Image (spheres, helix red, strand yellow):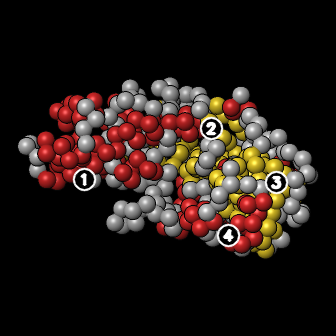
Amino acid sequence: MDFEWTALLAEQSVQALLKDALAAKMELLPLSAKLARTYAPAERAAIMDYYALLPRIFEKFGTDEFLLCDRLALEQSTAKDIAEWKAKLFPENCRINDLCCGMGGDSFALPGTTEVKGADLSTARRAMYTYNTAALGLPREAVDTDARTLDNGADFFEIDPARRESEGDNQRDYNNMTPAFAEILAIAEHYRGGMVKLPPGYPESEFPENAEAVYIGNRRDCRECLLLLGSLAKRPGRARAIILNDGKIQEWAPDTAREKLAEDLPERPLGRYLAEPLPALVRSHVFTEIGREKDCGILSPGIAYLTSDSPLQDPGFLEFEVLDSSPLGSSAVRAMLKKHDIGRITLKKRGVEIIPEKEIKRLDPRGSREAILFYTRIRGEKAAILALPLHTKSKAEE
């Protein structure tokens, strides 16, 4: 999306038209026909792309404002709940540089008492940032400056390095981040502290010893790895897991070095209970500390399923009572399902490559009960485990 398209989408006439279309729940085809009377094909395409994004914009940022963005800016931007949690890590009345600021998601949550300046090399992103922060009542400037050279005396920085290929697709190759990770660490030397937004799977081996790694997620996904540097790293060399769930916050912050957390628990035979850590606890390896405290083991090296003879009763885990297990073969699994009268299954997998939907269809269970079927490994061998969920409320659900 070029700069002129951000200007087009900011026009009051365009936004009024789109508000009416949203109110009428207008589909794309009739909207396209309506736009064709006034706008050129390229303009029409930009407006329709934006119209398709609007419900996601409202949901992600908790606003009914027509914030400007394109698909990639929206995908990479920080959601409201995470941005609000991160904003509380900064001291009051400080100066912050929002580097690689994009459409402004991280800046949206910073209070008006904080002096914030955005920086981005993209003309379109700077236009989005300036427009969006003004629309949300906290107008801020975005400057055309490389994050590696900006020197304006700010106290702290936050950065979301670009991960895009030349054609604009989201970049999954961590080696091609811009700025590169080593450059970000060099940038940090000019500030009292900073925070770096990284993909959850970023290699921990590259983290400095004096940094703190925070893995933020919900009960379904690990959404972000936040690396805290300088004075923001309150627990250097440690890791935390944060679960944000409907406005409630849960935190696990063991006083154990990251290297120790990454060590596997001992292998154990399948016990009466199986525990599945939430994704943020897996990425942070915090689940291993809880497993050690509760005398749990793992079924197979490198697979984050815990087993024990008593429930963990920890809100960071989904817990299940084991009914049975079998080798991972169609006849053995079907026989196990039939034995327990199972006709409806949810299939979970770790360490086994299958497509759950296709596998359920192939098994064609016919019983009257419902259960969870795990495809995983026990002592390295592929196995199926049949279990029932333990219906215990987490702290976030109480």
The type of residue carrying mark 2 is Leu
Query: Is residue 257 in view from this perspective?
Result: no
Provide residue 205's location: percent of width, then percent of height. Answer: 69, 65
- Residue at disc 1, secondary structure: loop
Q: Earlier in the sequence, mark 3 or mark 4?
A: 3
Cα separation, mark 4 vs mark 1, equals 44 Å
Residue at point 68%, 50% (across, down): 368
Provide residue 167's location: percent of width, then percent of height. Answer: 34, 66
Query: Is residue 44 in view from this perspective?
Result: yes
Cα separation, mark 3 vs mark 2, equals 29 Å
Cα separation, mark 3 vs mark 4, equals 19 Å
- Residue at disc 2, secondary structure: strand
> Residue 244's mark?
2
Label 3 or label 1, whichever lies nearer to me, is 3
Mark 4 nearby-residue class (10 Å; few <14, some 14–19, many ≥20): some
Q: Do the residues labelled 4 and 1 touch (CB within 8 Å)?
A: no
Which residue is the site of mark 1?
A: 2
Q: Which of marks 1 and 2 is nearer the N terminus?
A: 1
Label 1 or label 2, whichever lies nearer to me, is 2
Q: Which of marks 4 and 1 is nearer the N terminus?
A: 1
- Residue at disc 3, secondary structure: strand
> Residue 322's mark?
3
Which residue is the site of mark 4?
A: 352
Q: Is residue 30 above or below residue 198?
A: above
Residue at point 77%, 43% (across, down): 390
The type of residue carrying mark 1 is Asp
